[in-house]
Structures are given as structure tokens and as C-alpha cells.
Amino acid sequence: MSKPLENHWTAVVNGEQKHLEIAQTTRLVDVLRTHLQLTGTKVSCEVGRCGACMVLMDGEPVNSCLVMAYQCEGSDIMTIEGLHGEEKGTLHPIQQAFVEEGGFQCGYCTPGMVISTKALLDAHPEPSQEQIETGLCGNLCRCTGYGGIIRAVRKAGERCVVKETSAEETVS
């Protein structure tokens, strides 16, 4: 006989340990939006096709509408609210690049696009056009035509590489 799932859920969300009493079959997007009031993660298609609900789970981009609480128990989760510049309240270079390059219009897909860009640049600091297209293929935007988004990813990549190089030089 299998043991029923406990209703205890624990994960690190945006760098903070969280403990909740929730059904293990609660979707991660609902945990974030309803239980933790992190509403930057958007709900759109609810079937994993649009990327509006994209978050990083243990460093990998996932559609939070497809992940159940039991699947992310003990994970490290980053939402758009957890991404910021060197100081809280400042924009991360990816966010700044999206603003400067017009990488959004209505803004609904933007949190997912930014999170996917973070995962892409973590894996490929100087991505090729093909890597950018592959890295963003799980995100749908109905407004921009993607030109501004691709420019923003390129600019963010340049800034992040320059920043990492500068930081390495000051440590030496």
C-alpha cells in the first residue's frame, strides 16, 4: 500500500526558504501566484505552450503551469521577482536591455522571456542567433515580432560578458 502524499511543501524561492501546507498536486504557478503572491509569473495558455509562466527550477527554465508541487519539492526556484541588479530594486542587465531595445509591448510575455534569456545566457554567455532562437522557442509573444526581443538578448549578453570580465579582472 502506498503512503499518501504529505501536504508539507518546502522550496527555496528567490533565495528564501519557503514552507507551505498545500496539496502536492497544486501547480507551481498557483503556489507562486496564490500562496506566495508572486504575480510576476503570468498565467496564459495553461498547457505549457506559451512560456508566460516560465521560471527557473534548479537553474533550468520550466513552465510552472506544468509542474506540480511534489515535483519541485526542495528545489531552488527563481521567478521574475528574484531577478534584479547588483542591489534589490535595480534592474538586472537583461531587464535593462529589454527596456532599451523595446523587447516588450503589452508586457504579458516579458517575465517569461526575461527568465528564458537568463537561462540562455547562463548556458551560453555569447549566444549565436540559432542559440537565441532555440533558447526562446518556448516563449510566445503576440505583440513585438521578436526583433526587439532578439536585440535585447544580444545586448544583455554583451553586458553580462563585459560585467563578468570586469569582475574577474578586479579580483585578480
Image (cartoon, helix red, strand yellow):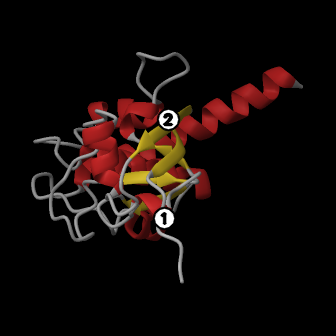
Residue at image location 36% in from the left, 62% down from the top = 136
Mark yes or no: residue 136 visible: yes
Q: Earlier in the sequence, mark 2 or mark 1?
A: 2
Q: Position of residue 66 (x, y in %)?
A: 33, 67
Residue at image location 37% in from the left, 29% down from the top = 96
* Foreground tag (2 vs 1): 1
Q: Is residue 40 left or right of residue 14?
A: left
Foreground residue, 64 or 19? 19
Q: Quadrant of residue 25?
A: bottom left
Residue at image location 49% in from the left, 49% down from the top = 8
Amino acid type indicated by mark 1? Gln
Residue 124, compared with residue 40, is above or below; it is below
Q: Position of residue 54 (x, y in %)?
A: 35, 55
Q: Residues under labels 2 and 1: Cα distance? A: 18 Å
Amino acid type indicated by mark 2? Asn
Residue 85, compared with residue 131, is above or below; it is above
| Marks 2 and 1 close (CB-CB < 8 Å) | no
Q: Quadrant of residue 32?
A: top left
Q: Quadrant of the N terminus?
A: bottom right
Q: Secondary structure at mark 2?
A: loop
**Residue at label 2?**
14
Q: Position of residue 100 (x, y in %)?
A: 29, 31
